[in-house]
Image: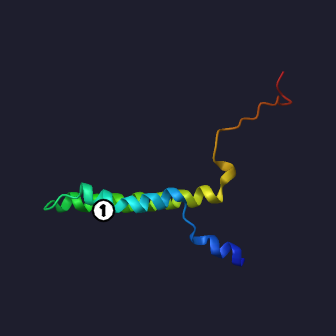
Amino acid sequence: MGEGRRQNRWVVGSGSIILLIIAVPLWNEFRVAGNAVWNIFLAVFLVGLAVAAIVLQRYFWKHPSEIGEARFDTTKHRDDP
């Protein structure tokens, strides 16, 4: 693995960074004092959302040609009349 590739391993996109920045205000806004079940659910949800954003951003970065509108082969095949 080259040095340039190694440096890009921990690159996080701007969407993921924004999500990580607003996670704290979201926690402060939706946390309910005295409701442990809701607070645990909220924490798991926010962490899962942040992890999903980072994983999706890395997938989009590694597979840019696979993202976009669908392309179909419209050429006529040999066995078609």
Number of labels in the image equals 1
Label 1: how many residues lie within 10 Å, few (<14), some (14-19) or many (20+)?
some
Instruction: Tell me how the rendering is colored.
Output: rainbow
Please identify the quadrant where the C terminus is shown.
top right
Residue nearer the viewer, 1 or 33:
33
> Which amino acid lies under the numbered mark 1 shown in the image of this protein?
Ala
Residue at mark 1:
43
- In percent of width and height, residue 76 lies at 82, 28
Relative to residue 77, is residue 52 depicted above or below?
Answer: below
Helix, strand or loop at mark 1: helix
- In percent of width and height, residue 69 lies at 64, 39
User: Which image quarter: residue 22?
Assistant: bottom left
- In percent of width and height, residue 37 lies at 20, 60
Can residue 1 be seen here? The reply is no
Q: Tell me if 41 is positioned left or right of 72 in this view.
A: left
The residue sitting at 68% across, 72% down in the picture is: 5
* Identity of the residue furthest to the right in this view: 78
User: Which image quarter: residue 75?
Assistant: top right
Q: Tell me if 81 is positioned left or right of 47 in this view.
A: right
Can residue 5 be seen here? The reply is yes
The residue sitting at 70% across, 78% down in the picture is: 3
Please identify the quadrant where the N terminus is shown.
bottom right
User: Which image quarter: residue 74?
Assistant: top right
Q: Tell me if 21 is positioned left or right of 15 in this view.
A: left
* Identity of the residue furthest to the left in this view: 34
- In percent of width and height, residue 43 lies at 30, 62
